[in-house]
Amino acid sequence: MRMEKFLPNNEPESILNFPFYWITQVNGKYLQLMEKSIKKLGLDNTKRKIILSTNSVGEASITEIANLALLKLTTTTKAVYRLVEDDILEVSSSETDERISVVKLTPKGLELVAQLNQIIQVTLSGVLQQFSEAELLHLNQQLQKLADLIPSN
């Protein structure tokens, strides 16, 4: 198979064959939709990503959360401490290495996770229902494969 047809070139229409064009379109629309949906909770997408990333691991260093949320370390650090001020996260020193700050959700943060998950379900269920379970499993497998193939920093 000729891979060139899946890469952008000088032909204006070529972008429509480029998988990353569609990935960025979907991600952009998703971020806009989430931003609008979570605004009433007083959150933005950066804070949402940090809260859900922290929830997924229980507790982690700020660096680990930045990596999970695909955010810059400085952005993550600032947002984490704003979330601490809002009593959503707590930060403490690691028991094994006091130089490392460990982040975890407070009870208020855990309540916020439940609210976020409910908003996500309500907001996206109509879209996801347009796919069969097999299609969603296949889509996730293909996206994971693509993510695994792209080198990380």
Image (spheres, grey):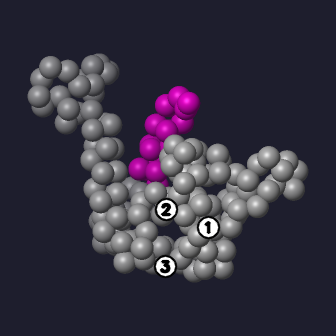
Left or right of 31, for residue 71: right
The reply to whether the magenta stretch includes residue 151 is: yes
The reply to whether the magenta stretch includes residue 13 is: no
Viewport quadrant of the N terminus: top left
**Taking the image as drawn, is residue 68 in sight?**
no
Q: Looking at the rendering, which quadrant does residue 9 occupy?
A: top left
Tell which tag, 1 or 2, sits nearer the viewer: 1
Name the residue at 79% across, 56% down: 93
Above or below, 52 against 141 in this view is below
- Mark 1 vs mark 2, CA separation in Å: 11 Å
Q: Which mark is residue 45?
A: none
In the orientation shown, which residue stands out farthest toward the left? Answer: 12
Tell which tag, 1 or 3, sits nearer the viewer: 1
Q: What range is drawn magenta here?
A: 137-153
Q: Earlier in the sequence, mark 1 or mark 3?
A: 1
The residue closer to the viewer here, 140 or 26, is 26
The residue closer to the viewer here, 73 or 29, is 73
* Residue at the disc numbered 3: 115
Q: Which mark is residue 84?
A: 1
* Amino acid type, label 3: Gln
- Mark 1 vs mark 3, CA separation in Å: 18 Å
Left or right of 97, for residue 36: left
Q: Looking at the rendering, which quadrant does residue 127 occupy?
A: bottom left
Secondary structure that dominates the magenta span = helix
Residue 112 position within the rendered picture, expressed as x and y whole percent measured from the top left: 53, 76
* Residue at the disc numbered 2: 47
* Amino acid type, label 2: Lys
Secondary element at tag 1: helix
Viewport quadrant of the C terminus: top right
